[in-house]
Amino acid sequence: MVTKILPFINGAFVASQAERWIDVVNPSTEEVISRIPDSSAADADLAVDAAYEAQKSWERTPAVARGDYLHKIAGGIRKREAELTDIVIREGGKTRGLAKTEVLFTADYLDYTAEWARRYEGEIIQSDRPNENIFLFKKPIGVAAGILPWNFPFFLIARKAGPALVTGNTIVIKPSQQTPENAYVFSQIVEETGLPKGVFNMVPGRGSVVGRALAENSKVGIVSLTGSVPAGQKIMEAAARNVTKVSLELGGKAPAIVMNDADLDLAVKAIVASRVINTGQVCNCAERVYVHSDIKEVFTEKLVAAMQAVKYGNPSENADLDMGPLIEKNALESVTDKVDRAVKQGATLAAGGKRAFDRGYFFEPTVLTDVTNQMDIMREETFGPVIPVAEFSTLDEAIELANDSDFGLTSSIYTKDLENAFIAVRRLHFGETYINRENFEAMQGFHAGWKKSGIGGADGKHGLEEYLQTHVVYLETSK
């Protein structure tokens, strides 16, 4: 059965006036599973207008009452956990375990965000004048636009909508055209909670049309996008027209440094887990490995064996898998091209390296050795189950190689030496560093990148404050 996805605007699902529909394909089977309208800029503007009007009264709703709605949405998600898990598997090719984790983590994230309702604060600032008080209020920005990726499509709704709504903003979500059905069900849950009309809106469609229209709209106060660097650049250009605030989580090229004193079994397990999660289609995945020359041979041997042991296939048919397919045909072609170019540039193919199966967008778990930092595979985001391995002799050299990148999202180091760990922490130019563990952030942390990996960030107190602006009041009395 092919599901038709409708926009959710001003508290209701509305019939689309689009002249054409876009097919959504199951990446494991290449079958059409749903269709979305090729929505227009006018559709996006209609949703923004609804959000703009709703925000006036939503801002005046007590924060704790706003948080209560997030708790209700979280409860609705848990009631439909099995259905949503199947949708995430079908749309994105996630393994069952990862899909279920995403669904439940989304509910937990909304509950966590709701609890900030009584916790975010303004300030009282000391004045230089004897009869004056200075107050700093934290206030909502207004209408938020959330432009979502396909790799964690359900969780990213909560990551953007949760902090926006609890702080008094309203929101318009544009789901990825590859993974829209989960947002459709999220909207159904929102409708069931009785959330005031216009507070949450969802418009499916193309990023080049709907996403751009949202970023260009003068009634939008902040645009939050998770996506590629080119997509982020286009959003910045569109938002610049009205000097609209942007919060961007973009690409990554995470280095993993393996020192000669590392627990190699732990390092291999963590790096492989961090690389094959969601078939390597995660911006904070370990994308390049630097291993000390003293242990290169034994580490590589263990790494190759671990990657060759990775189980993959159609996650709708087999729950016991480590990874599924890539998201689409273009992704399969891109990963194939990157591996082929690496081999032409001098890398050695130690495992995998080609498409798997005749149907679906599957790619073999791949290890490349004899890699240098000048190769494209070490400089371009791969977004696939490919691990390139280079060697180093000193920690100074490893840190220099790791920092030699346009990206700065996540990084990791494996060592038993606390001094080496903290040298890396002080000198690595990345928003996050993981020590002796896989790359995966916590909801109470702050997920933010340096350089071309983004502007602003998400999660925790600092992610919440992305959706707030300050209002300073000077109150002077006569006595």
Image (cartoon, rainbow, N blue to C red):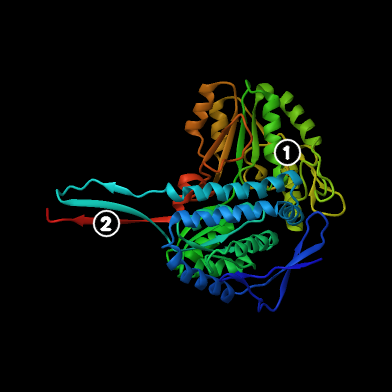
Tell me residue 221's x, y (percent).
Answer: 45, 63
Element type at mark 1 = loop
Mark 1 Cα-neighbour bin, 10 Å: few <14, some 14–19, many ≥20 = many
Tell me residue 314's x, y (percent).
Answer: 82, 49
Q: Is residue 63 above or below residue 347?
A: below
Q: CA distance from mark 1 to mark 2?
A: 61 Å
> In terms of depth relative to the viewer, which is nearer, 138 or 310?
138
Circle 1 or circle 2, nearest the eye: 2
Q: Is residue 232 above or below residue 197?
A: above
Q: Is residue 227 visible?
A: no
Tell me residue 400's x, y (percent).
Answer: 54, 34
Q: Is residue 414 above or below residue 379?
A: above
The residue wearing badge 2 is 473
The residue wearing badge 1 is 347
Q: Amino acid at mark 1?
A: Ala
Q: Relative to residue 472, is residue 165 drawn left or right?
A: right
Q: Relative to residue 258, is residue 348 drawn left or right?
A: right
Q: Relative to residue 411, is residue 60 drawn left or right?
A: left
Q: Relative to residue 36, is residue 160 drawn left or right?
A: left
